[in-house]
Image (cartoon, grey):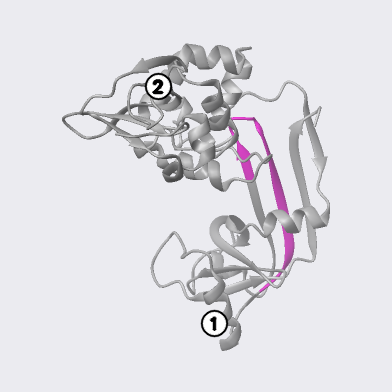
Amino acid sequence: MRAHLGDLLVIDSPTTGATTRDGKIVGLHHEDGTPPYDVRWSDTDEVTLVFPGPDAHIRHLEQVGPAAAARGTRPGTDEAEAGSLTASPAGTANPGDIGRRVGAERRRRGLSREETAGRARMSPDYLAYLEERPADPTMATVIRLADALGTTVAALRGGGMDLPPGQGHALLHPQLRDLSPDECRELLSTHGVGRVAVSSSDGRPAVVPVNYEVVDDAIAFRTVPGSAPAAAAGREVAFEVDHVDEALSQGWSVLAVGPASVVTEPGAVHRLTERAHTRPWAGGGREMWVSIRPTHLTGRRITPADR
């Protein structure tokens, strides 16, 4: 066994082969890289002198990327986290759902990252990464964080997904502002799931969720003839998209109003089908494309007042 500074020492379970502990090698006692090593453990941030046994192996720096190794990121079951570290541009923040919930709960309880990391027996650097980057922490990590924050694993993992959004606590000082048409277009262009408001065949109003695309400034979705969404064709309709961040109690909504029509030109249908990001979640043969050309765009965003 030979290692270099910055490599990871990984301890595997002798029965399952799964990673049970790992740490960054921060000190060598022999010039040829043979044991023992000074190891900073990723779960406690403590440095100990280690004489590796048969259940240990080295994960070299080039295998996990220098950023991951520098932080002591767990390999194996958490390799996706190491990949996110090396792939994310420096200085950017794009937290995942668990990271947002952890950060929000930590701030709600008035805890620093160092205090929370100490309670959860992990490195403050790893907690910072978890809060600031998309991550898929192990169940053991989530359990320790839930215990440190006095909450539940279900809450940190987004339990209650069958409940309607918006049940979190309101911001202490919310700010509600109108969005410009350009901001509305930008948010619409992310595509995903929106809601179209129509009058159904029996004359009653209906609001129906649909998977949609934005192509050439038009909102397009697939459906089947005779369905509620198909009733939009030939009428002026309203189309709404929103996003609610439960962890931070903020979000936005965009409303587009304009005439809807069925796309019949074969080239246009082919182009829409080729550029679609996903198939309709409802499944089935939904090949009828309906296009909405917005003539009026409005939107609002709720954020903390100090932003």
Q: Residue at x 46, y 31 (%)?
A: 5
- Give the residue pinned by disc 2: 29
Residue 216 falls left or right of residue 180? left
Residue 255 colored in magenta in the image: yes
Residue 1 colored in magenta in the image: no
In the rendered image, residue 100, in percent from the top left (x then y), is placed at 58, 31
* Residue 270: mark: 1
* Picture layout, residue 108 above or below residue 235: above
Residue type (three-letter) at the residue carrying disc 1:
His
Q: Which residue is drawn at 76% across and 54% down?
A: 184
Note whether residue 205 is visible.
no
Q: Which residue is drawn at 52% across and 17% down?
A: 117
Q: Give the range drawn in magenta.
A: 243-260
From the viewer's side, name the closer residue of 74 and 286: 74
Magenta stretch: dominant secondary structure: strand
* Residue 145: mark: none
Quick one: label 2, few (<14), some, or many (20+) residues within 10 Å? few
Secondary element under disc 1, as helix, strand or loop, is: helix
Q: Residue at x 56, y 25 (%)?
A: 125
